[in-house]
Image (tube, coloured by chain):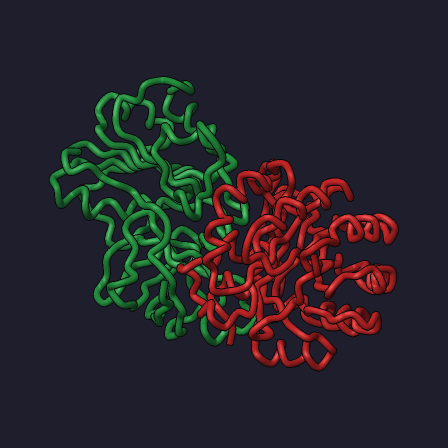
Amino acid sequence: MFKQDLTFRTTLMNAAGTLGFIPNPRSPLDLGCLGAFITNPVSLAPRQPAENRVLLPFAGGFLLHTGLPNPGLRVVLRRYAARWRESPIPVLVHLLAGSPEEAARMVAHLEEIDNIAGVELGFEPQITAEMALARVAAALGELPVIACLPLEKAAELAQALAGSGVSAFSLAAGRGTLAAVDGRLVSGRLYGPALLPQALAAVQAVVRSGVPVIGAGGVYTAKDAAAMQAAGAVAIQLDTVLWRGGWS
Amino acid sequence: MPQVKGQLVEIWIENGALAGQIACPPSVLPAPGQYLAAYALEDGAAALAHPLFLAGAAADGMRVASPLPAEWQPGVQLALRGPLGHGFHLPVSARHVALAALGESPARVLALVGQALAQGCAVTLFCDLSGELSWRNLPDALEVSPLAMLKDALAWADYLALDIPIPHLFERYALTGLRPGDILPCKAEVLAAAAMPCAGLAACGACAVHGRQHWLLACEDGPVFDWEQLD
């Protein structure tokens, strides 16, 4: 069995976690402009919402902590696999695998589904290069693998994973910490136009690995997307600009 | 769902927060408890859409519940998507209506007042707000009582609409004197107020609510729930 090629009709796609598990007809965005659809993060077992889930705005963006809730791979496949088969847009499934064994099991399930264009493998922020290599090795099979690198470790992990067989790198949302209304400190993912400079620098660093890079983070305008491409990104993931209601 | 353009035509301060009136096509007008996702077209730095809840009817649009983003000025062009979510369902048979708000503003439940009065209901608002209640177009027929009196309302109300922030949802039992599992003496609906960043597009989980059977999302399954749906 040969590994499929990873090709997109256009250079735009959504970032994992921004449009649900299937292309949503209620999206204000013309989904026809997307070259691929990335699903919400899926773990092997169900994940509950974080008890201390929160949204904290800051100038030019916001911090979001949700716990990445999802019903687990078995339920996701039962609910959405048929819709993925009918999708006019190539579907990539974003996997939250906690170990190489989990990555291998999840990919094996997905290889039995038609019309899956590939998997995007997410990592926890504290992942080491050694752990990431083991997970990528376990995930490699018939489906192309995109390694979604934590922004803060993107350059380091890109160098380590450059010869691993991944088809591309993408960038996860950066992380940060803010004080909540009650004064407690909350860590979470960062989104918004203010993240663009950090994301562009990460793209420039990851491009040096020689592996194609899908840029992401802070893209809210066509000008931002052009800057991503100038930094070396071959494609661009749109994140919370889709929640705002499209880009300008 | 298409996105349409609207305009903020007037703003005012309502209990210390910015409220206003927008002009918009009738096709996007939300019912009480539903919302619109809106952002200012000129504001390139806006990271998210803002949820706009109906506060009351207005010519060519609607009055919008506070708070509005502080940077919005009259005349600003808005991109609007909606109506989103599930709103309140005032029974046509209701004649004694209790509205209550635990959060920063009762404006979202006040959106029911016009409909309730039109069908001949006696309406009482239960809320605790510092300072004078300075709402525009508040009808004389509306009675206002402290939140502590809500317990007594269950003896006469045949419909209760409650607006309460998600972290305080369990306080609804103390407010009403009911216990989990009690049979409600009337139909009761709860607006679970929360930040809804994805506005129903992604099931992101930020507005997740403990349901009786499973987790619910305020942005999509709500923000108005039947009392019995919630844990």
Q: Give how far across and how far down residue B13 sits, in percent.
A: 39, 58
Tell me if residue B149 can be seen: yes
Q: Give how far across and how far down residue B205 sits, in percent.
A: 54, 45
Chain letter corresponding to the colour red: A
Image: A173 above or below A197: above
Count up the numbered dots: 0
Tell me if residue B197 can be seen: no
The residue depicted at 73 percent of the width and 65 percent of the height is: A167
The residue depicted at 73 percent of the width and 66 percent of the height is: A168
Question: In this view of the protein, which residue sits in the foreground, B34 or B96?
Answer: B34
Image: B180 above or below A4: above
The residue depicted at 45 percent of the width and 32 percent of the height is: B211
Question: In this view of the protein, which residue sits in the foreground, B15 or B22?
Answer: B22
Q: Quadrant of the N terminus of chain A?
A: bottom right
State left or right for residue B95 relative to residue A40: left
Name the residue furthest front. A1
Image: A106 above or below A205: above
Question: In this view of the protein, which residue sits in the foreground, B199 or B69?
Answer: B199
State left or right for residue B130 relative to residue A75: left
Question: In this view of the protein, which residue sits in the foreground, B22 or B223?
Answer: B223
Q: Give how far across and how far down residue A110 sits, in percent.
A: 61, 49
The residue depicted at 40 percent of the width and 69 percent of the height is: B79
Q: Give how far across and how far down residue B90 sits, in percent.
A: 22, 39
Image: A140 above or below B223: below
Chain letter corresponding to the colour green: B
State left or right for residue A133 relative to residue A10: right
